[in-house]
Image (cartoon, helix red, strand yellow):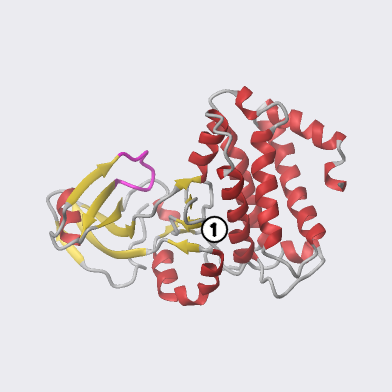
Amino acid sequence: MKADFQSLPTLPDFGKVNSYYDAVRILFDDHLQEIEEIKTSGGQVEKVFSVIHLKKRWFVKITREDCQSCETTHFDTEWKLKKEYKKYSWLSLKNAELILPTKGATFILEHKKHLIASYAWVPGSTFSDIYSEHFNKKTGNKTLEKAFYRYGQVLSVMHLDPEKPSEDIDFILNSPVRLHLSDRNGRNEKYHEDKDKIYILDLADDSQYVGRDVIVKEELEFWLVHMLDLYDNLNTSENCGSNHECLLVPFDSFAQGYISSLPTYNANVILAMLKTIYFEIVKYNCKFSHSEFCFLEEKLRAQNWLGS
């Protein structure tokens, strides 16, 4: 199976190139002050570069047509978002920004077609790194709480219209989201504390979502599953904290932020909705993941957490 580069908008085609470095140079008209390759774990991305062009830093991704899982990835999604970005201007009200491609092209190297695209280099730290820093190094600052609170604010308005409240949890959970963004996993989001800004990266979509309404429940479950997966970032289980802080603090901060962006909704209804999804994931992880989740499940049951 090959990646679908045919659905992309009209992009320049460089034809055959001699190396990945040459493709990057051509993309920037050979006017580069700096070019540096960044190590990547593979998967869908073949090569990653940091470049400086016209005194600004850019992030460059190169994808090969036969990359892992590429046959289910819709690379055209981020280009469509770029074209429609004005429709989502309300994101800026939450000081959030989608990082969209600035330029792109295709080329042939080693008899394989590739897609190259550049993006503005954005400051800040991923949520995965913020989590690791907080619980492994015991930084004791409030960056983690602020970051997850702010992401809750942003994800909330991507899911629900603040001006159209409902008190029916099932109705809310089955409502189509206002803006679907695939693969929200803690590594594709960055928080810049000085600017108090959220940057959202890697906006290609997956085939399972394309061509249909994506509902709030799906998006919430996907994020909360990956938020709990951050537990795997701990160097030792003891770093979680004696009161399961590594599992509860991110959720509590996220939930508070999510609720704060929906002032016309019943806060208790939204909190109950978030807690119910979170608790089901904790129960699932108790069966199939770390024992820490079983200890947390017991604690939450003892506290009648869902009813509190």
Foreground residue among 162 and 16: 162
Which residue is label 1 attached to?
208
Residue drawn at the location 34% of the way across and 59% of the way down: 120
x 71%, y 59%: residue: 259
What residue lies at 40% left-to-right and 51% top-to-bottom?
123
Report the residue at 76% width, 48% height from top.
275
Q: In which quarter of the image is residue 283?
A: top right
Q: In this view, does 184 lie above or below 38?
A: below
Q: What stretch is highlighted in magenta?
A: 39-47
Residue 139 in magenta? no
Magenta stretch, main secondary structure, is: loop
Q: Is residue 201 above or below residue 296?
A: below
103 horizontally vs 271: left or right: left
Rendered view: 8 above or below 207: below
For residue 45: magenta? yes
* Helix, strand or loop for disc 1: loop
As rendered, which of 160 and 138 lies closer to the eye? 138
Position of residue 246 measured from the top left corner of the image (x, y, whole percent): 64, 35
Where residue 175 sits: x, y (%)? 69, 67
Q: Given the image, on which type of amino acid does mark 1 rest?
A: Gln
- Between 53 and 107, the residue placed more toward the observer is 53
